[in-house]
Image: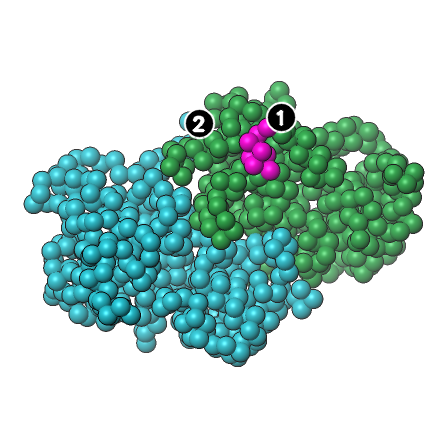
Chain colours: A cyan, B green
Amino acid sequence: MAPALEAQVQEEEQSLPQNNNFYNSLNDATHRSKVTVIGSGNWGSVASKLIASNTLRLASFHDEVRMWVYEETLPSGEKLTDVINRTNENVKYLPGIKLGQNVVADPDLENAVRDSNMLVFVTPHQFVEGICKRLVGKIREDAEAISLVKGMEVKMEGPCMISTLISQQLGINCSVLMGANIANEIAVEKFSEATVGYRNNREVAERWVQLFYTPYFIVTAAQDVEGVELCGTLKNVVAIAAGFLYCFVDGLEMGNNTKAAIMRLGLREMKAFSKLLFPSVKDSTFFESCGVADLITTCLGGRNRKVAEAYARNGGKRSFDELEAEMLQGQKLQGVSTASEVYEVLSHRGWLELFPLFSTVHEICSGLLPPSAIVEYSEKLPRSF
Amino acid sequence: MAPALEAQVQEEEQSLPQNNNFYNSLNDATHRSKVTVIGSGNWGSVASKLIASNTLRLASFHDEVRMWVYEETLPSGEKLTDVINRTNENVKYLPGIKLGQNVVADPDLENAVRDSNMLVFVTPHQFVEGICKRLVGKIREDAEAISLVKGMEVKMEGPCMISTLISQQLGINCSVLMGANIANEIAVEKFSEATVGYRNNREVAERWVQLFYTPYFIVTAAQDVEGVELCGTLKNVVAIAAGFLYCFVDGLEMGNNTKAAIMRLGLREMKAFSKLLFPSVKDSTFFESCGVADLITTCLGGRNRKVAEAYARNGGKRSFDELEAEMLQGQKLQGVSTASEVYEVLSHRGWLELFPLFSTVHEICSGLLPPSAIVEYSEKLPRSF
């Protein structure tokens, strides 16, 4: 085999869980991994479904998957957790999809994590810090975390990735899983892919891959936590730009060049920003599912794109909060807050001019510029557009 | 400025023609460059329009742009060249668009190239070799060529890129221009981008950039002829795969994960194939417009995608030739022949198994497999898809 492809194929092979000794050692009940999903929104519910199908199938995991649910009372007067446990469906955030009978909804956060050594974080990013504070001292010492959360926290000392936040608050290792995030498609078992970003331990990465991997959800691993996480986070900002822009591109069949151009320019800023923040970030990560594929998916059909398009169609006269409430049934839009956080980093470091796409998105979202500014956002997207 | 972004910005700056001394020396009439466009299909006509707007505007070029037209008699009985020269429109291949009054259609190939030092090749790839044979000894010694042609020739001694074919046959240097190739969008001045791939001479690359660059058609240069050319060529094979696949993805809003996945898997085979053939090919080329952006454009809206989708909808019962004739009004489909050429290379070198996407596309196009085979083309796109 030629060397270049050999390396590629080897990488592929490694990305599937092959380490049988490792898994065999986990096969006795006392060493089985136990999983808790912290979050039960649209993506959290789909993640629970994926995971539950694997814990049933694989001997190295306890069957039961705990899903921590932020308790709500439904219009019927019933508690959301009761309905999930009775019907096996998250009727509010993923109606019509069976989660698997081994998913147990639990409104008590501390109880939900008590026995688990694999913690899956999948909440809106603004809730992560508060949740971690409640979890300090309440989790197993050998626990590993993975974050499916998109977003970043900007603190006085600089930007902090969610995986780092979890790691620091809880004193545990934290990987990430990013990729095609259109949860409703995965829920109905359409083919898609994802990337696990891990720091050092390949075996840990393989365990996460095994937990999520299904024939319709292909997961590979990349040793680049920050690169994978920033891909997942920043693509939402590009999707907002795409949404603004689509409003000015006529017709269904026209404007594909333009759509592709905004994705490429966005990818370029994603790559430049990530590498400036973390010189360890690898170019190859942007060729993974979490990079180019997730960007395409999100810019074609994601909710950030859709709400941004609605915002532009209304000429900025209806707020994002209003449109979000109307269009997303309680789901949160990540792109707008991420754009604001990225803007804070850019202005703090004097990089605004270097990132015209990112800057313009925030300036439109915050009402400083009209949505049409996206078409003039740099000399590269001219007025005659 | 931080080093990573400085390098990027520097690259951007270099990609615009800044070398004033070089251009000033060309400003007197005797040294003005004269351009001939060899080909007058859809893309050739759009290229002529782009070029003609620049030769009028810039002192370093002769105003007149010769466009060689393969003469046809229209249903009205008129010659195509006569109609183009009278109406300033290519009524057959780009109706409704004015080319610029300085575009002169010429049915005589030798006459069309006689005075020109910049030759733009933009014909279906199967005609390039014959045209070159007719041009031997008929062109200026100082001529430079650029190829906008997608495709490759497979000869006994191995694959031969079109730029290499032109170079070898005519003994001149040949660059390439690839990128968003949906000519009808560029024709109506929708924003898009392209990449000039050049071999050694940066000044030559800048002259080509200057000839094509307009506010709505942003051209950058990359020193990687083979990488740029293979991007432009191979993406048509991925677009065929995307077209087959779209037939099996339901609804307008669904299946974006799947679409993104096939583009990413295609990009991966494009990169692996290019680097196996030419170890000099750079990863960074795939982030240029000719790479990821053109791939997205082509898979979303290109003619290869559309005809392949129609082929799959008809269950392979109507031939590509028939659909091409019906759907493309005389334009040629490049992806099918490229898939066949790529397959020849793969089977000759024993690489078939390493390129399941490329192989499967050819096997479907040639009737060995049904269109539905695309959803099973490897273990990665499973039967349950």
Residue at 60%, 48% (x, y): give it: B301
Residue at 88%, 36% (x, y): give it: B73
Q: Is residue A363 left or right of residue A103?
A: right
Residue B94 visible (yes or no): yes
Secondary structure beneath label 1: strand
Q: Badge 1 sits on which subunit?
A: B
Q: Is residue A359 left or right of residue B179?
A: left
Residue farthest along the front direction in this orientation: A76
Residue A111 appears at what percent x and percent y? 12, 62
Question: Is A370 above or below relative to A10?
Answer: below
Instruction: For marks 2 and 1, give the CA distance.
Output: 20 Å
- Magenta stretch in the rendered image: B310-317
Q: Which corner quadrant of the image does residue B16 belong to? A: bottom right
Task: Kindly indicate whether the residues beneath marks 2 and 1 are on one polypeptide chain.
Answer: yes
Badge 2 amino acid: Glu
Which of the two residues, A186 or B126, is positioned nearer the viewer here?
Answer: A186
Q: Badge 2 sits on which subunit?
A: B
10 Å neighbourhood of mark 2: few (<14), some, or many (≥20)? Answer: few
Q: Which residue is mark 1?
A: B154
Upstream in the sequence, badge 2 or badge 1? 1
Q: Which residue is mark 2?
A: B353
Residue B230 visible (yes or no): no
Residue at 58%, 33% (x, y): give it: B314
Q: Quadrant of the C terminus of chain A?
A: bottom right
* Residue A48 inside the magenta-drawn segment: no
Checking the image for residue B321, the label placed there is none
Q: Is residue B129 left or right of residue A211?
A: right
Residue B209 appears at what percent x and percent y? 69, 53
Residue A149 appears at what percent x and percent y? 32, 61
10 Å neighbourhood of mark 1: few (<14), some, or many (≥20)? Answer: some
Residue A365 appears at what percent x and percent y? 49, 74
Question: Is A60 above or below relative to A315?
Answer: above
